[in-house]
Image (cartoon, rainbow, N blue to C red):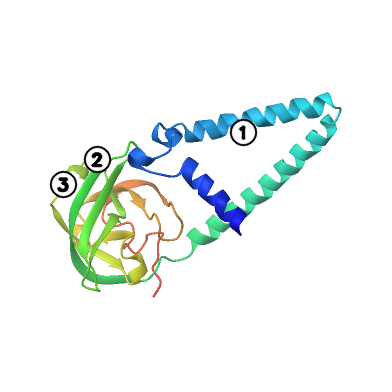
Amino acid sequence: MARRERSERIVTRVFVGTGPDAPFLVRHDWAIPALVFGGCGVFGAVTLWLTWIGWGHVLVWALIAVGALAAVLMVRMLAHLRRATRGPLPALDRTPRTATVVLNADNGEGHTLLLRYTGADGGPHSAQLADSPDDTWVDAFTPGSTWQVYTFRDPELADSVVFLTEAHDEVWRDGYVLDGVRIGGEGGPLTPGPGSPFLREDGKWRFAP
């Protein structure tokens, strides 16, 4: 146990930290490149050594085994993601709540819209907007503007995403964001159009009763 705790402290000291106390590699964004190129260097050295001592065939079979294991894990992960995203969304609380935009930021692939509202528990919550407005509407979501939203019934999802209510059906959407609801990252583009892609009768999403 003591050896494991010591190892964890070493790893934490080397790779974890923020601000001026962060490790040098982390502070200068070199940690991941150092790990990648360092790992490749070690792998290359081991490959040369095994080839030199005549164990090249062992390396070949090891690579085949690693590739097969990676393929199995990839198939399992894809199957899990498919199962996780095919079911209904968690139950929706259809009580309209007033939410205020606190962030409208271009992340390079779209806009991140963060809204703050008062939840059913009476406390403040911040959540992303599940509806991604298209370019003709995104500027309307300026910080400080207010919108009517629905939230999930589950209080554990109060800080995940919120949905524009039917009061804003004039807003055109061209994408969706469901990060952290069923899997860590879930989202994508939609055919641009007005109205909620989540609330319409012919939509592909359904909410649990």
Tag 1: amino acid: Gly
Mark 3 / mark 2, whichever is N-terminal: 2
Q: Which residue is mark 1?
A: 39
Mark 2 vs mark 1, foreground winner is 1
Mark 3 vs mark 2, foreground winner is 3
> Could you say where residue 115 lies in the image, as x and y percent from the top left?
23, 55
Q: Which residue is mark 2?
A: 135
Q: Work out whether residue 85 or residue 72 is closer to the camera in this orientation and state it.
A: 72
Q: Is residue 41 above or below residue 171?
A: above
Q: SS class of the residue under badge 2?
A: loop
Tag 2: amino acid: Asp
Q: Is residue 98 above or below residue 209?
A: above
The residue positioned 28% from the left and 60% from the top of the image is 163
The quarter in which the C terminus is drawn is: bottom left
Q: SS class of the residue under badge 3?
A: loop
Q: Do the CB atoms of the residues marked 3 and 1 lie less than 8 Å apart?
A: no
Give the left or right position of residue 8, taking residue 205 as reference.
Answer: right
Q: Which residue is mark 3?
A: 142
Mark 3 / mark 1, whichever is N-terminal: 1
Q: Quadrant of residue 99?
A: bottom left
Q: SS class of the residue under badge 1?
A: helix
Q: Quadrant of residue 139?
A: top left
Give the left or right position of residue 180, taking residue 56 as reference.
Answer: left
Looking at the image, the residue that sits furthest to the front is: 2
> Could you say where residue 79 lies in the image, as x and y percent from the top left?
59, 56
> Could you say where residue 5 lies in the image, as x and y percent from the top left?
56, 55
Looking at the image, the residue that sits furthest to the right is: 54
Tag 3: amino acid: Thr
Give the left or right position of residue 199, taking residue 100 as reference.
Answer: right
Other residues around mark 2 within 10 Å, as few (<14) / some (14–19) / many (≥20): some
Q: Do the CB atoms of the residues marked 3 and 2 lie less than 8 Å apart?
A: no
Mark 2 / mark 1, whichever is N-terminal: 1
